[in-house]
Image (spheres, helix red, strand yellow):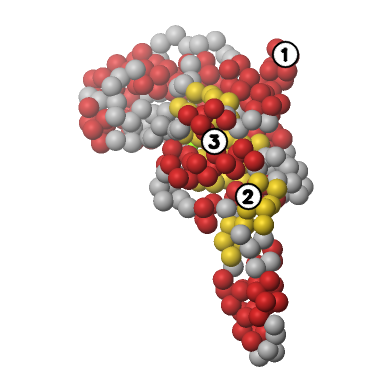
Amino acid sequence: MKDAIRAVQEALERHDYIAEPAIATAVYLARELRKPLLVEGDAGVGKTEIGKVLARMLDTELIRLQCYQGLDVNTALYEWNYQRQILHLRIVERDGRDPAEVEAAIFGRDYLLERPLLRAITRREGPPVLLVDEVDRADDGFEAFLLELLSDFQVTIPELGPIRAAHIPYVVLTSNRSREIGDALRRRCLYLYIEHPSLEKEVHIIKRRVPGVSQRLADQVARFVQALRARRLSKVPGVAETLDWGQALVRLHRDHLDLEAVQATLGCLLKDRDDLSALAATETAALVAAAQGTETAAL
Ligand SMILES: Nc1ncnc2c1ncn2[C@@H]1O[C@H](COP(=O)(O)OP(=O)(O)OP(=O)(O)O)[C@@H](O)[C@H]1O
Ligand SMILES: [Mg+2]
C-alpha cells in the first residue's frame, strides 16, 4: 500500500505536481475505486491542477467543464446543431420528402453537438478525466443533475433515447466553498481538502515550476510568502501567486530577495488594494530580512 502511494507521489512529481502522501492517497484511491474526487481548498492551492495532472499521468484526454452561475444542461451536456438542421431542411424541402423521415434525420447523432459531459461519457478511446471545475458556482439544480449523471453515467436525450457511458470517466470536482456542496453529492465522492503548502513543499514547487530559480531565491520567496499568509489579508496569496512572483524575480535577474525588488513586484503576490496599502514599508523590510535568515536544506 505504502509503495503504491509512493509510486503515485513520484508519478505526480514526474508530471510537475508536488504532493504530500494525503494528496497522493486521494489520487490513488480515486483511480483505483473509480470514484469522483471532490477537492476543496482556498484559491490557488492546486485544486484544478489535480484534474490536469491526473490526465497527464494517465495519458488521457482532459475534458473540462467550467461551472458558473446559470450554467445549464444544454451548455454542459449537448445542443442540437440548429444551423445544420435548418440547412438540411432547406435542401430536402424541394424534394417533397416524407416529413417523418426528415425529422428522424435531423435529430440523429450527426446533428448533435456534444458538450463536455456528453463527450466525457461517449469517448470511445478509453476513459478521459472529467474536470468539473468550481462546482460551487453552479446552482442547486445543476448539482442535482450532476449527481444523477455521476450515479448512472447514463443520460437520456429525448429524441435519441438513453446513452450509456462507453467507459466510466475519472472525475475530479473542485470547489472554493463559495456555496456548500450538498450532502448527496459529497457522499458520492472521495474528499480531499488541500491546505496552503508547508514551507518545504512550497520551496519544492517553486524549484519545479520556476525555470532558472536559484535555491536561495526559492527558499526566500517561500519564506516570505509563508510569513505573509500568517497576516490578516483579504486575499491570501496561493501557490499561483508564489509562482508568478518567483518568475517575475527571475526575470529581474534576482537570485535572492532585496527590498527594492520586493517592493516593485509586490503586486504579483497581493492582488487587493487594501492588502497592499496595509503592508507598511517597514513591515515589508522586516519580512524581507526574516526571509533572508537561515536557509532551508536543499530538497
Ligand atoms: N502541489 C503543486 N505542485 C505543483 N504546482 C502547483 C501545486 N499546487 C499548485 N500549483 C500551481 O499553482 C497554480 C495554481 O493552481 P490551481 O490553478 O490548481 O489552483 P486552484 O486551487 O484551482 O485555484 P482557484 O481556486 O483559484 O481555481 C497552477 O499553476 C499550478 O500548477
Ligand atoms: Mg481552480
Q: Which residue is mark 3?
A: 173
Task: Tell which circle, 2 or 3, labels the residue nearer the N-terminal end.
Answer: 2
Q: Quadrant of the N terminus?
A: top right
**Amino acid type assigned to the residue bearing label 1 in the image:** Met
Instruction: Name the side, left or right, on which 246 lies relative to 112.
Output: left
Q: Residue at x 54, y 35 (%)?
A: 173
Judge whether residue 266 can be spotted in this image. no
Instruction: Name the side, left or right, on which 15 lies relative to 235.
Output: right
Q: Residue at x 66, y 90 (%)?
A: 94
Q: Is 170 above or below relative to 61?
A: above
* Foreground disc of the pair 2, 3: 2
Q: Which residue is mark 2?
A: 155
Task: Tell which circle, 2 or 1, labels the residue nearer the N-terminal end.
Answer: 1
Q: Position of residue 277 (x, y in %)?
A: 22, 31
Q: Which residue is mark 1?
A: 1
Q: Residue at x 61, y 37 (%)?
A: 151
- Secondary element under disc 1, as helix, strand or loop, is loop
**Quadrant of the rendered structure where residue 180 is?**
top left
**Amino acid type assigned to the residue bearing label 3 in the image:** Leu
Is 206 in front, or is 110? 110
* Foreground disc of the pair 2, 1: 2
Q: Quadrant of the C terminus?
A: top right
